[in-house]
Image (cartoon, rainbow, N blue to C red):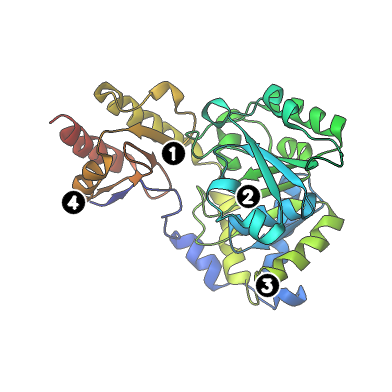
Amino acid sequence: MIVDLRSDTVTRPTPGMLEAMMTADVGDDVYGEDPTVNALEAEAAALFGKEAAVFTPTGSMANQIGLQLLVRPGEELLCDVKAHVVNFEMGAAAALGGISTRTWAGADGRVDADLVEPLINRPNPYVTVTRAIAVEHTHNIGGGTVQPIEELRRLRGLADAYGLGLHLDGARIWNAHAATGVPLDEYGRLFDTVSVCLSKGLGAPVGSLLLTDAERAQRARVIRKRLGGGMRQAGFLAAAGRYALANHIGRLGEDHARAAHLARSLEPFGICDAAKVETNIVLVRVPEIAKVAAAAAEQGVKISVLGADWGRMLTHLDVDDAGIEHAVKVLGTLLGK
């Protein structure tokens, strides 16, 4: 048995998804003529109460387009110190968008408007002006942290007061929606630009979307082309996304339940805090974790090593109850030595 807990991006398309992909109606998306891409964009925009959506190959591209729509070169973005946009996108904000960044340190990646406000630079000839704020939801390195809707509303009010844009890195927004019941369009109304990932949690092999208003969406297509993201018969990929939206959001609670069970089972070994597991991510602290991970992999259990003594495990579409029990058995044996 192979139980791959490194990420929720390792899934394989289901038979139903493969069928949808192979029978997709396609055209040239650079010309705006791929009917399946157009349908995916319209459906996603409607889910979030937005005027338009733009299909992109990756979440990093969707994020970077969103940031460039809100922040001009030489201006500033504020985000959490552990945010994906400044840690795992290869410096793209600076290298490709000319965007300066400053960060706040929130507990487990949780946003706090009181930490953000003192960082805001108003227009001034001596400092870099702040133009936008980015929030990650759920927060990856925070451990699948769900951002409280009340705090997001406070942040929207803060952004309005200072005339700032708000970008949501919603790669795992589906998990936040499943955990809280907050409607997707309520999240959508709070942010000017929203990126969502179809290959995290939902099981699509490729693809993300940037959601925004119609005017920004037109500019987004120019930036996408500039970044090399113009795709031709992309409907084969978009069909997987449409299938994922229709069939895989409602089952995310199963992943959350399995993550909670995994954390509770491993908590007695002192490597994780089950109370902090809110969605599908379990962070662990293990001395010499690389050795433990290598030994676990030999027995069919793969975990992600993030540092000398910490890592993570994610539940997803391809891990069932039997897989979780196998992971608990293998890791329990290794940690019990």
- Amino acid under disc 3: Gly
Foreground mark, 1 or 2? 2
Label 4: element kind = helix
Secondary structure under tag 3 reads loop
Q: Which quadrant of the structure image shows residue 271? A: top left
Residue visible at 41% across and 55% down in the picture? 10
Tag 3 or tag 2, which sits nearer the N-term?
2
Q: Which mark is residue 255?
A: 1
User: Is residue 135 shown to the viewer in this render?
Assistant: no
Depth check: give the residue in front, 9 or 87: 87
Rendered image: mark on residue 196: 2
Disc 2 and disc 3: Cα gap in Å? 18 Å
Q: CB under 8 Å between callouts 4 and 3?
A: no
| Residue 88, position as x, y percentages in the image | 52, 50
Q: Check disc 2 and give the amino acid type.
A: Val
Residue 139 tag number: none
Q: Residues within 10 Å of mark 2 (few under 14, many from 20)?
A: many
The residue lying toward the viewer, choosing from 128 and 180, is 128
Nearer to me, 124 or 212: 124
Look at 61% across and 64% down and name the residue there.
238
Between marks 4 and 3, how big is the CA–CA gap?
A: 41 Å
